[in-house]
Image: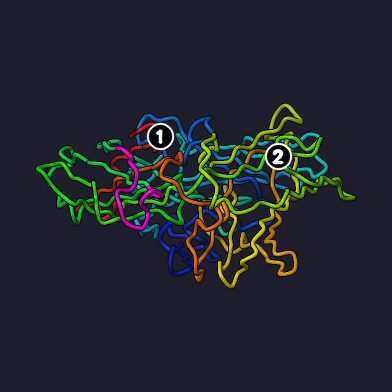
Amino acid sequence: MHRFGLMGVGMVCMGAALSQDIVYDDAVYDENIHSVQLYHGEDRLTPPLVGLQGDEPLTLRFDDLSGSAATYTWTLLLCDYDWKPVAWPQNMYLGGALREDITDFRFSFGSPLPYVTYRARVPSENVKPLVSGNYLLYVFRNFDFHAPVLTRRLWVVENIVEPQGFVKDAGGGPLFGKGQDVMFTIDVASLGSVNPFTDVAVSVYQNFRRDNARHNLKPIFVAGSKLDFQLIDGSNTFPGWNEFRLLDLRTLNIRPSRAVALTEDESGIKHVVMAVDSSRSQRPHALYADLNGLGRIITLDGRDPDTDGLYAKVVLRLYAPEGPEITGPVYVLGPWSHGELRQEFQMHYDPVSKIYSLELFLKQGIYPYLYVTGRGSQVSPWYYEGSHARTDNNYLILVYFKDPLRRFHRLVGFRNLNSMRDR
């Protein structure tokens, strides 16, 4: 995560400097902005990855809970492989008008907490990337570039190369029986003459998580133009973890599944207390559909989840007799945390009841989540979840090429592998 203020981004957007620090990561800068989604086309269960040429754009959605409409504008900022801003004028990497207003908005219906829901297609004819790579979507309010409301990372890919590979049970080491090896090769003949150890960088994401992503992987073997990433040093071995737990908020007319209490406050906002979860580390693995970490906004209490979905305060709880002295901090990782261990989603421990708890403010939908121990713990990150070699996981492989002429990393290919399908 990188922060840049006046000096850091002065040349990024048409020479205009930002009036405050922004994070080159998924972030919200206004407490009224909620339920930010960025996905490919109309499929809400996809990562924010779009082709450079002739591809269906991404869909951006978010809610403004201030209750009144505003004018929002978006633009794109080019970043390097490490998600630091590329110090180019925007017209060197964007075509068109460089920014576009969001004109598609609707008011909520039947919600005790009124909101306005916004929708935009990214990129567009007015704002079109000219080069591939990492981009930051930057949204600001009322034509004031110095009033950011949200940022989101996205990938623009050229589809020049396509990794070929499979996923297998970890072959040995501490993750034997608990982990998965992501084995793949890449043919870079279409890139011309390249140095595979300096010009090519590969990242691998498990279920689009960032807390355990692997970056800057290098081949173990090179045969002509084929780069072999069937590594044996563990750098492409992931803990299998477990299937995600599921929080089902599709209906709030009756008590949701596994909820022990459903109440309503004076303002009409629903409050949900979930049953206490417990450790799964000693339980056998059970395979079920868990959305592989991607949440979905959906309601059974109305017709349109974007305008009819209700917001609720939800309390998740975890029984943990060991306490933070052993486990260190415990986080709830889910769509709300963007695949990272973020401070605002660290759980609070009650030594009397021996229960961790955390309150979330969520729109109706289905949310996968995991309990993850953080740094400083004496146990593994998956201490409360268990880890299995046959867990259903998606692996996104991204291939970057450091262009010697342009001096930044182009994103030249990708591949999605599944641990159940691609064996």
The x and y percentages for residue 9 are 44, 63
Q: Among all residues in the image, which is located at the extreme left?
A: 224
In this rendered view, identify the residue nearer to me: 249 or 385: 385
- Structural crowding at the residue carrying mark 2, measured as other residues with C-alpha within 10 Å and reported as few (<14), some (14–19) or many (≥20): many
As shown in the figure, which amino acid type bears the numbered disc 1?
Met
Residue at the spot 75% in from the left edge and 29% down from the top edge: 302
The x and y percentages for residue 13 are 45, 55
Say which mark, if any, is on residue 201. Answer: none
Say which mark, if any, is on residue 420. Answer: 1
Q: Classify residue 413 as left or right of residue 64.
A: left
The x and y percentages for residue 122 are 49, 38
Q: Is residue 411 above or below residue 323?
A: above
- Structural crowding at the residue carrying mark 1, measured as other residues with C-alpha within 10 Å and reported as few (<14), some (14–19) or many (≥20): some
| The quarter of the displayed image where residue 413 is located | top left
Considering the numbered disc 2 on the image, is that residue within a helix, a strand or a loop? loop
* Camera-side mark, 2 or 1: 1
As shown in the figure, which amino acid type bears the numbered disc 2?
Leu
Label 2 close to label 1 by CB (< 8 Å): no
- Mark 2 vs mark 1: which is more N-terminal? 2
Colour mapping used in the image = rainbow
Image quadrant where one finds the C terminus:
top left
Inspect this view and state whether residue 82 appears: yes
Residue at the spot 51% in from the left edge and 50% down from the top edge: 152
The x and y percentages for residue 145 are 55, 55
- Identify the magenta region: 166-179
Q: Which residue is mark 2?
A: 249
In this rendered view, identify the residue nearer to me: 377 or 293: 377
Residue at the spot 46% in from the left edge and 57% down from the top edge: 211
Considering the numbered disc 1 on the image, is that residue within a helix, a strand or a loop? loop
Whole-angstrom CA distance, mark 2 to mark 1, is 28 Å
Q: Is residue 325 magenta?
A: no
Inspect this view and state whether residue 121 appears: no
